[in-house]
Amino acid sequence: MKIGKGFIQKRFLPIIRMLVAFLVMTGASWWAVDPPILANVTSSHFASSTGWTREDVEREAAKLSKPPQNARIDRVWKAIPDLNGIEVDVEETWKRVQSGVRGAGGGIPWVIRQVPAEVSLKDLPPAPIYRGNGSKKQMALMVNVSWGEEHVPDLLRVLDRHQVKATFFLDGKWVAEHGDLASAIAKAGHEIGTHGWGHPDLRGKSVGQIKQNLERSRRAIEEASGIRPALFAPPAGWYDDRVVKQAWGMGMYTIMWTLDTVDWKRPPVHLMVRRIVGHAEPGALVLMHPTPGTPAALEGIIQGLRGKGYDLVTVSNLLSPERPL
């Protein structure tokens, strides 16, 4: 049987046309593009499925990067803690973007490293601490306890309701009499420091007497709560260089305060709240005591500070060099 040209065209031309159309629709036109150029465009500019580009990553990484800050001795505020820097690993971040990984809120999935400062808080000579690093929008709530045990449970309830952890500086003599409350504070996850033994003014004591007082208090706290304090708050803010050096030698920072509720004078609740919220600043240490009005004031203080965007942390967290991301 002889097959003519017309027969071939009639039989196979529609099939050939369909095949060409299929190749075009499925992207087979890449044959017309130089493969190295295509590979370069894909890897350098376009994320696989997120919509972020390499340029987006590099631009935003430059905004995120921060240099570390050394700890220092300030003329007014004394010891100021160090703060880690932020370094973005652009290459690893871009690999995650290409893999389709998404970050918080659908953003760029950053790969970030914290860069330690050259001078840390422990490298400074012994000095009191009145505040944390002002580049962190955090504040710490402190409660000095030598009396007022009847109000401690109310304070714990307010803190628990708002899921805030505070730092309680406990008088060792008070702990010896109220070990159950010291234990309750620890079990609630709060930080515990020492307030000395018997609310003493250690400035007039010998070095040996200072050490004995701090050791006695710390031992009582550890026995009652299981926590060995690494922070010391001098009663009434009384200290001198010998007190600070002795606490330092025992592995404890001497902690003062930035803002004071002055609750021991029994002011109205709204005034205590205004003293703190109205003067809020990054890195502030807030002082209070277990007085009748303090639980209600604490409620307003927590709400007011959070309303201003502050993260409420323990003193140790505030002094930590870790930079919040």
Image (cartoon, rainbow, N blue to C red):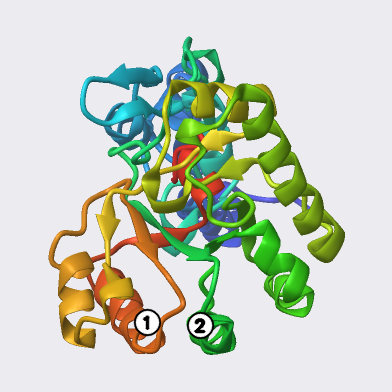
> Label 2: how many residues lie within 10 Å, few (<14), some (14-19) or many (20+)?
many
- Kindly identify the residue that appears in the image at 82 percent across and 65 percent down: 224
- Kindly identify the residue that appears in the image at 48 percent across and 39 percent down: 319
Determine whether the residue tagged by mark 1 lies in a helix, strand or loop: helix
Identify which amino acid the numbered label 2 is placed on.
Leu
Identify which amino acid the numbered label 1 is placed on.
Thr
**What whole-number distance in Å separates the C-alpha atoms at marks 1 and 2?**
8 Å
* Position above or below: 314 against 55: below
In this picture, residue 292 sits left or right of residue 227: left
Residue 115 visible here: no
User: Which quadrant of the rendered structure holds the C terminus?
Assistant: top left
* Percent x, y of residue 24: 46, 49
- Residue on which disc 2 sits: 155
Label located before the other in sequence (1 or 2): 2
Determine whether the residue tagged by mark 2 lies in a helix, strand or loop: helix
- Kindly identify the residue that appears in the image at 34 percent across and 41 percent down: 131
In this picture, residue 265 sits left or right of residue 104: left
* Percent x, y of residue 72: 35, 18
Asked whether the beta carbons under mark 1 and mark 2 sit within 8 Å of each other, the answer is: yes
104 or 139, nearer to the observer: 139
Disc on res. 294:
1
99 or 294, nearer to the observer: 294
* Position above or below: 48 against 262: above
Residue 127 visible here: yes
